[in-house]
Image (cartoon, rainbow, N blue to C red):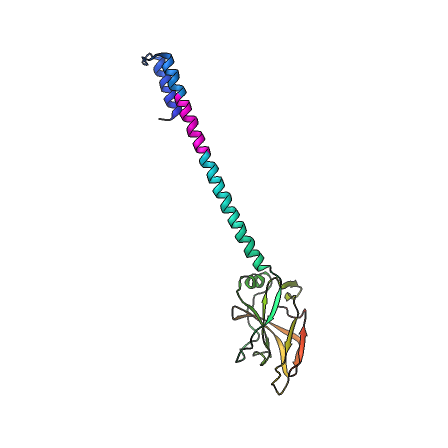
Amino acid sequence: MTEPNRAQALMDEFKTGLDKDGPIVLAERVAALEAENDALIAAQAGQDDEIAKERARADAAEARASKAESGEKTAKAEVKKLTTPPKPRKLGEIDDAPTGAELRERIADADEVEIAFSDGTREVPGIAPVGVTGDAWRDHANGLMLSKSVEIEGDREANTSVTVDGYALLLDGKQVAYARRSTPIQVAPGQRVSIENDIIF
């Protein structure tokens, strides 16, 4: 029986003359019930406050984690030269390459973002790929453009020049896109070439 129903039952009992203790005792009982009800309400309020605090702490922790992840993804853009593979990889045009928002999302989700240089079918021997980190990509009319300049250098021990036909984008070691240059680059042994605003997928 709920507290209001108990109070009503006592009142009905008093009215019908079944309560032998008299009106004073009945009033004391009602007062005791009201005090008990107030205590229950106060206890519930305390529990609600504690739940609210726990939720606030959880929300704060989630916000910190989200901020840390966001900061990691939007860190300062950086391009670093990687180790030249011992054997040139097969890199060239691919079908169904992601573009636009889908490509940006896949880049953001990748642990390793790499750009390698291709002669059209295979990686150019002696030219090191580069790793890309941070917020290094910008929207372009033709796709997604690398905003940082890249410097490549021909193999000093090579006997002839090599040709760079285009750029291969690899995410976590797998090629996902290819960008062919309008004009191939000829790179002589030991020659350094700067590429800027030209790598667009």
Could you say which quadrant of the image residue 140 lies in? bottom right
> In this picture, is 14 found above or below 60?
above
At x 37%, y 19%, the residue is 29
- The answer to whether residue 183 shows anywhere in this view is no
| Left or right: 154 in relation to 20 | right
Q: Is residue 81 magenta?
A: no
Residue 18 image point, x, y percent: 31, 13
> In this picture, is 42 found above or below 74?
above
Q: Quadrant of the C terminus?
A: bottom right
Residue 200 image point, x, y percent: 63, 68
Residue 107 image point, x, y percent: 56, 64
Q: Most prominent secondary structure in the magenta stretch? A: helix
- In the rendered structure, which segment of residues is drawn in magenta? 32-45
Residue farthest along the bottom direction in this orientation: 159
Q: Quadrant of the N terminus?
A: top left
Residue 84 image point, x, y percent: 56, 77
At x 44%, y 33%, the residue is 44
The total number of labels drawn is 0
Could you say which quadrant of the image residue 2 lies in? top left
Judge by depth and name the residue closer to the eye, 27 or 160. 27
Q: Is residue 44 magenta?
A: yes
- The answer to whether residue 41 shows anywhere in this view is yes
> In this picture, is 34 found above or below 22?
below
| Left or right: 72 in relation to 12 | right
| Left or right: 15 in relation to 131 | left
| Left or right: 63 in relation to 12 | right
